[in-house]
Image (spheres, grey):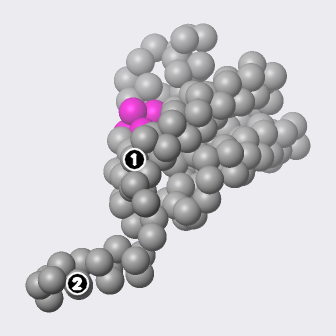
Amino acid sequence: MSADAGEATTVSRARPGTRRRVIAAVLLVLTIGAGLVVHAALPDSSATDIAGDALYAVAAYLAVLVVAPRLPAPAVGGIAVLWCVGVELFQLTGLPLAWGADFVPAMLLLGTVFDVRDLVVYIATIAVATALDAVIRLRTRPAR
């Protein structure tokens, strides 16, 4: 075995989840970009609201993967759902709306007003993301 091959093996063992983290980070940046396009460039409608909610949920899922790439897909999905539901329920306080009026990025992160449809979109989107992630992980798992 060459020194380079041994070094590569050591690096891959030392950093499990690195590839998954990098892919999730790239996808997160692309998802945020798509969300900003939907928010700023498309007309405000039910369709763009749902698309924005779905992209927000995907971003939440990917953010959890960036932070904890070794978690199993169901755990990532559970954390993402908790985040999205928590943010949506926080909107009932009126604080995100007030903060968003003063600082627009707060509105993009925390939303503005509570909507039950948002909860449905978040949960459905994260369920799909979790299933896709689980299937991808099974298919890309190295043979033992």
Residue 116, how many percent across, how many down? Answer: 81, 22
Tell me the crowding category of disc 2: few under 14, some 14 to 19, or many 20 or more residues within 10 angstroms, Cα based.
Answer: few
Please name the residue shown 84% across and 39% down the image. Answer: 89
In space, the residues marked 2 and 1 are separated at their CA atoms by 22 Å
The answer to whether residue 83 is left or right of residue 58 is right
- Give the numbered dot on residue 45: none
Which three-letter amino acid code belongs to the residue tagged 2?
A: Gly
Residue 57 seen in the figure: no
Please name the residue shown 47% across and 28% down the image. Answer: 39
Please name the residue shown 51% across and 36% down the image. Answer: 135
Q: Secondary structure at mark 2?
A: helix
Residue 47 image-quadrant placement: top right
- Main secondary-structure element of the magenta-colored stretch: helix
- Give the numbered dot on residue 6: 2
Q: Residue furthest top?
A: 46
Which residue carries the number 1 mark?
A: 140
**Mark nearer the N terminus (2 vs 1):** 2
Please name the residue shown 41% across and 18% down the image. Answer: 42
Q: Residue furthest right?
A: 93
Task: Please tell me which residue lies in front, 79 or 45.
Answer: 79
The answer to whether residue 24 is left or right of residue 108 is left
